[in-house]
Amino acid sequence: MDNYEVAQRASALPARFAERVSPSTLESIQLMEEGGEYEELTIELAASLAAHNTPVTAAERDELLALLEAMEMPTDPIEQLNVQG
C-alpha cells in the first residue's frame, strides 16, 4: 500500500465510523484527517473502538490492521476490537 492509498483509505474512516464513536472522538479524528495526520487518526480510532467495545465487522478490523501495518504503527488495539459476525 503506497502513501496515496493510505491517505485515501484513512480519509474515509471518520465518515465510516461517525455514528459509532463519541462526538469528541469524531471531532478529533476529523481534525486529524483535515490535517493529514493519518497515522494518529487510525490509531486513535482503533483505540477508541476497542476502549468502548464498539462492534466492528471483520472487514473493518482487517482494514484498520492493514492501515496501521502500512504506516508502521502499533497494532495493539486491533486485538481488543469487538468483532461481530
Image: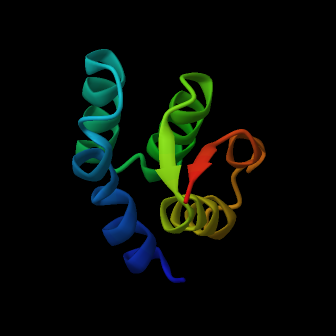
In the rendered image, the residue lying farthest to the bottom is 1
Q: Looking at this view, is 67 or 2 the one in front?
A: 67
In the rendered image, the residue lying farthest to the top is 24
Left/right of residue 28 with respect to residue 77 in the rendered view? left
Q: Position of residue 27 (x, y in %)?
A: 25, 25
Residue 10 position by quadrant:
bottom left
Q: Position of residue 8 (x, y in %)?
A: 32, 70
83 w.r.t. 77: above or below: below
Q: Looking at this view, is 70 or 14 the one in front?
A: 14
Q: Residue at x 31, y 16 (%)?
A: 24
Which image quarter holds the N terminus? bottom right
Q: Residue at x 34, y 38 (%)?
A: 32
Left/right of residue 47 with respect to residue 26 in the rendered view? right
Q: Position of residue 49 (x, y in %)?
A: 52, 34
The mark total stands at: 0
Left/right of residue 35 with respect to residue 42 in the rendered view? left
In the rendered image, the residue lying farthest to the front is 85
Q: Residue at x 34, y 35 (%)?
A: 29
Residue 62 position by quadrant:
bottom right
Which image quarter holds the C terminus? bottom right
Residue 4 position by quadrant:
bottom left
Q: Position of residue 78 (x, y in %)?
A: 69, 48
47 w.r.t. 66: above or below: above
Coloration of the structure image: rainbow
66 w.r.t. 73: above or below: below
Left/right of residue 73 with respect to residue 85 in the rendered view? right
52 w.r.t. 36: above or below: above
